[in-house]
Image (cartoon, grey):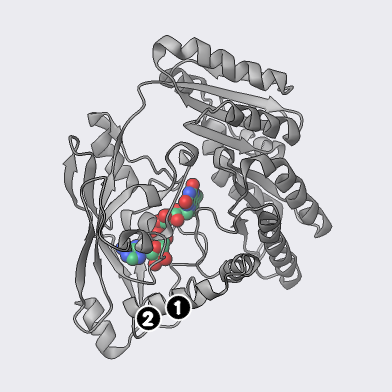
Amino acid sequence: MIARWAYKHEVPIYPEGSSTELTGSSIPEAGGVVVSFQFMRRIREVNIVDGYVIAEAGVRLAELDAVLEPKGYMFPVDPASWRAATVGGVVNTGAGGMRGARYGTMREWVSGLTIVLPDQRGTILRIGCKTSKCRQGYDLVRLIVGSEGTLALVADATLRITPRPENLVGMLAFFKSVEDLMGAVVDYKSMGLQPYIMEFMDSKTVSIAGSSLEGAPVENGDALIVALEAPREAASRFEALLRNVALRRRAFKVYTARSTSEIEAMGLMELRRRFFPASLEYARRKIGKPGSRVMVLIEDIAVPPSKLPEAVKAIRRSAEEKGLEVVIGGHVGDGNLHPETWFDPGDREWVSRVEAWFEDVMKIALELGGTVSAEHGIGKVKRRGLEMELERLGSLRALEIMAQIKRIFDPKGILNPGKVI
Ligand SMILES: Cc1cc2nc3c(=O)[nH]c(=O)nc-3n(C[C@H](O)[C@H](O)[C@H](O)COP(=O)(O)OP(=O)(O)OC[C@H]3O[C@@H](n4cnc5c(N)ncnc54)[C@H](O)[C@@H]3O)c2cc1C
């Protein structure tokens, strides 16, 4: 109904889940109506035998997990914001997370959608299937995944689910240099390992996050956190493999655990969990002048994993040239880096240095054969980056095709205007 009304009166509408996105894609700016999905919270069906759930757009990933966990199942896409992030939000950003190297992103896990079009009739379309194999002509489901609320309102989603791993073997290793650490990542990957989790935090992030950690291991170095699925019978073999590769790459301290419960008891994942809150606290302390505001900019690029050491070096060099403090962490198993910096948005000169660095980071990703946006999307802040990426590929025509697709779904251009293209 709202879609029909907005079409008739040409009022912009802005779909909203929990507003945790990081690219400005949920910001209403041109006047209009925010359509919140917070009250559409029903999980309509949980089907273990056929391997899917149907959840309304406002269901949070943590709520979904609370239902699946007792059944030994999970929805594998796990953005760090999973306690708040909604089904509609993760579908529309095409989100990823720590388990991305093993399970990919939303693109792989959405098999069907109910969508509402902003047209004369407020057309409701059910697209996709409950089965994992499904051909329905052009793949409209995948077109909506990652469309950032610009093509349709998502009412509910059919999501594939998977059994929780029986057992995990874990490692937290500290290195004196990022090159050594990335060398270990390349070694694990060239052995064909598909880690459940493979996370990197540079030494500065470690010291910031570690300063408020109690009872979990922290050392003064760059950290690599790995978890592998391994049946209990094979746990010690996988543990030795993780440890030996890290030591061969000159890790100076290696902690390992042979089971999921041991990983938790030893706190091997605690550092990673502190990544975002710790940098925000640090930025507040650093800027901390009365009256000043603090913003933390979280970048999101991906490069082929073999190019990670070069990427980290170049990102740091650019920050140094611009007099910026940065911390770098990310989901290195799939080459996804999240460099961060912070600034006072009231300080124009500081903001312009941050903007220049932001553009440099995107260029670095492209030069190394990567992409300007791995999992956070385009929103407002990466529209220039998207153009740069397509231009480099000689494919600017793709932007025109996207604009035509947008017009087919949203003839009056009222759905989340000013985002993506
Ligand atoms: C601390 C922190 C950690 C994060 N970690 C990760 C991470 O590891 N991986 C990752 O991928 N992202 C991460 N994010 C980003 C963010 O949480 C994800 O993008 C998430 O998918 C957004 O979900 P949301 O419900 O908050 O959506 P919102 O932010 O409300 O919306 C996101 C986009 O989807 C659109 N939208 C929302 N609901 C609908 C709907 N029903 N129909 C149509 N359009 C809709 C909005 O218009 C907007 O364009 C993180 C964010 C924070 C703050």
Question: Which residue is at a point 34% across and 69% down the rendered structure image?
Answer: 15
Q: Secondary structure at mark 2?
A: helix
212 horizontally vs 89: left or right: right
Label 2 within 8 A of ligand 1 by Cβ: no
- Answer above or below: position of 401 versus 85: below
Decide: few, some or many residues near mark 1? Use Cα within 10 Å; few <14, some 14-19, many ≥20.
some
Question: Which residue is at a point 23% across and 43% down the rendered structure image?
Answer: 52
Label 1 within 8 A of ligand 1 by Cβ: no
Question: Which residue is at a point 52% across and 11% down the rendered structure image?
Answer: 237
The quarter of the displayed image where residue 152 is located: bottom left
Q: Nearer the viewer, residue 366 or 21?
A: 366
Question: Which residue is at a point 73% across and 30% down the rendered structure image?
Answer: 180
Q: What x and y, as percent, mark residue 215?
A: 55, 23
Mark 2–mark 1 Cα distance, whole angstroms, equals 6 Å
Q: What x and y, as percent, mark residue 121?
A: 18, 81
**Residue linked to disc 2:** 407
89 horizontally vs 50: left or right: right
Indicate the quadrant of ligand 1 in the picture. Answer: bottom left
The amino acid sitting under disc 2 is Arg
**Residue linked to disc 1:** 403
- Answer above or below: position of 34 versus 292: below
- Answer above or below: position of 315 versus 167: below
Q: Nearer the viewer, residue 414 or 83?
A: 414
